[in-house]
């Protein structure tokens, strides 16, 4: 007769081969013998809908059985279900209690998750000192994700020498192949934050993270190709990477893909695709994308000219901080496009835009013969490819 470990291994093998029914039969047979690992595996199957109809309530039932028999991985999974109310009534205090049990048993992932709960006040009072302590405990066990979590908390809270520890934690996690850590450390090198600016190092780290489909890394790698920083300038490669990041939901990349299609940078001009990507970025909260949509409606590029819609879009973008949209409202009043011509109203919008640092607004005020000395040195003209940061 096979022992439980042999049968468990056989069940896992069937899972990897895609024969979930045979695996389920084995796990159920072992669960009747009170084997916690089998109960846990049944919980996984019901949670993911792997070989059975997805059922979070049944997943919680099996995780509970495994948890009651002392399995820390089951405690962690069950805690997360209580945290978010998946298959059980949401109960953050119960989630915290379960996570605490698993962490007290030395389970590294539970220690890291408990740190997250302390950092955010989930099921307990917010306590960043306790969060750091649990992150450090998981770091001591070698968990790369804990290094990232601790580094992020240090960067959020600390200034001075302590930030050096954060950079070292990110290096260790990045060396372990953790994509988010490679992405975050690359950003530090790209911005010259905590570590000296190093475009080549940023390129290396963003490349590794981009290969793991990290959208922010794909976006910043595209920026490096577009600007020729750390790598020869290559607009076609930049467009390819912007598109990958955009497909993965990066709003700034979606905006830049729109710009590329509108201006023909790295790809042929296609106003319809530009409009589509601008709308995607606008839905993601990009005021620059809303502004550019307004410009396309104002000038009839890829869509019928409509001053009323353009004005509405400029207004929305302006309210959300786009200085160029505010300047564009000034243009509409100066030219009388869809509104009654009003130099006074135009000046009001130009001054508001100039106060936000828009060089185009300063130039329009100068053309109107207005005093612009209060705005200081004129900012250099913006490049065609605008990027959110």
Image (tube, grey):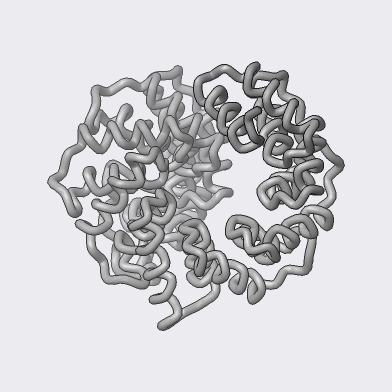
In the rendered image of this protein, does residue 287 appear above or below residue 162? Answer: above
- Position of 38 with respect to 336 (left or right) is right
277 and 315: which is toward the camera = 277
- Identify the image quadrant of the N terminus: top right
Question: Which residue is found at the position 38% from the left and 26% from the top?
Answer: 274
Q: x, y percentage for residue 42? A: 71, 31
- Position of 8 with respect to 189 (left or right) is right
Residue 361 appears in the figure: no
383 and 74: which is toward the camera = 74
Question: Which residue is found at the position 63% from the left and 30% from the top?
Answer: 2
- In the picture as drawn, the residue positioned furthest to the front comes out as 1
- In the picture as drawn, the residue positioned furthest to the left comes out as 232
225 and 162: which is toward the camera = 162
Q: x, y percentage for residue 175? A: 33, 57
351 and 214: which is toward the camera = 214
Residue 309 appears in the figure: yes
- Position of 113 with respect to 159 (left or right) is right
Question: Which residue is found at the position 40% from the left and 49% from the top?
Answer: 179
Q: x, y percentage for residue 33? A: 78, 34
Q: Quadrant of residue 372?
A: bottom left
- Position of 385 with respect to 144 (left or right) is left
In the rendered image of this protein, does residue 293 appear above or below residue 359? Answer: above
Question: Which residue is found at the position 67% from the left and 28% from the top?
Answer: 45
Q: Quadrant of residue 5?
A: top right
How many numbered marks, from 0 up? 0
- In the picture as drawn, the residue positioned furthest to the bottom comes out as 161
Q: x, y percentage for residue 329? A: 49, 43
């Amino acid at each position: 007769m096979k022992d439980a470990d042999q049968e468990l291994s056989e069940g896992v093998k069937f899972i990897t081969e895609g024969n979930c029914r045979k695996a389920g039969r084995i796990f159920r047979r072992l669960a009747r013998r009170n084997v916690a690992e089998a109960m846990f595996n049944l919980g996984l199957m019901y949670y993911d809908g792997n070989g059975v109809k997805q059922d979070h309530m049944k997943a919680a039932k099996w995780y509970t059985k495994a948890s009651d028999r002392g399995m820390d991985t089951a405690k962690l999974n069950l805690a997360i279900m209580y945290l978010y109310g998946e298959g059980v009534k949401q109960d953050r205090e119960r989630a915290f209690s379960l996570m605490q049990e698993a962490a007290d048993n030395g389970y590294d992932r539970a220690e890291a998750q408990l740190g997250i709960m302390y950092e955010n006040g989930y099921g307990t009072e917010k306590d960043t000192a306790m969060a750091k302590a649990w992150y450090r405990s998981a770091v001591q066990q070698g968990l790369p994700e804990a290094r990232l979590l601790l580094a992020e908390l240090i960067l959020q809270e600390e200034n001075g020498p302590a930030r050096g520890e954060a950079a070292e934690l990110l290096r260790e996690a990045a060396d372990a192949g953790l994509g988010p850590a490679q992405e975050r450390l690359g950003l530090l090198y790209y911005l010259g934050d905590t570590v000296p600016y190093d475009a080549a190092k940023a390129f290396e780290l963003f490349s590794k993270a981009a290969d793991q489909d990290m959208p922010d890394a794909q976006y910043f790698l595209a920026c490096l190709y577009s600007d020729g920083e750390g790598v020869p300038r290559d607009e076609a490669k930049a467009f390819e990477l912007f598109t990958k990041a955009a497909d993965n939901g990066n709003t700034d990349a979606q905006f830049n893909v729109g710009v590329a299609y509108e201006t023909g940078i790295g790809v042929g001009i296609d106003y319809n695709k530009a409009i589509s990507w601008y709308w995607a970025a606008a839905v993601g909260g990009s005021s620059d994308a809303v502004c550019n949509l307004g410009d396309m409606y104002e000038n009839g590029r890829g869509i019928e000219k409509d001053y009323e819609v353009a004005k509405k879009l400029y207004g929305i973008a302006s309210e959300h901080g786009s200085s160029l949209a505010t300047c564009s409202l000034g243009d509409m009043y100066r030219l009388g496009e869809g509104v009654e011509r009003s130099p006074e109203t135009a000046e009001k919008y130009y001054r508001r835009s100039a106060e936000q640092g828009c060089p185009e607004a300063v130039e329009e005020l100068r053309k109107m013969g207005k005093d612009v000395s209060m705005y200081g040195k004129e900012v250099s003209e913006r490049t065609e490819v605008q990027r959110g940061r």
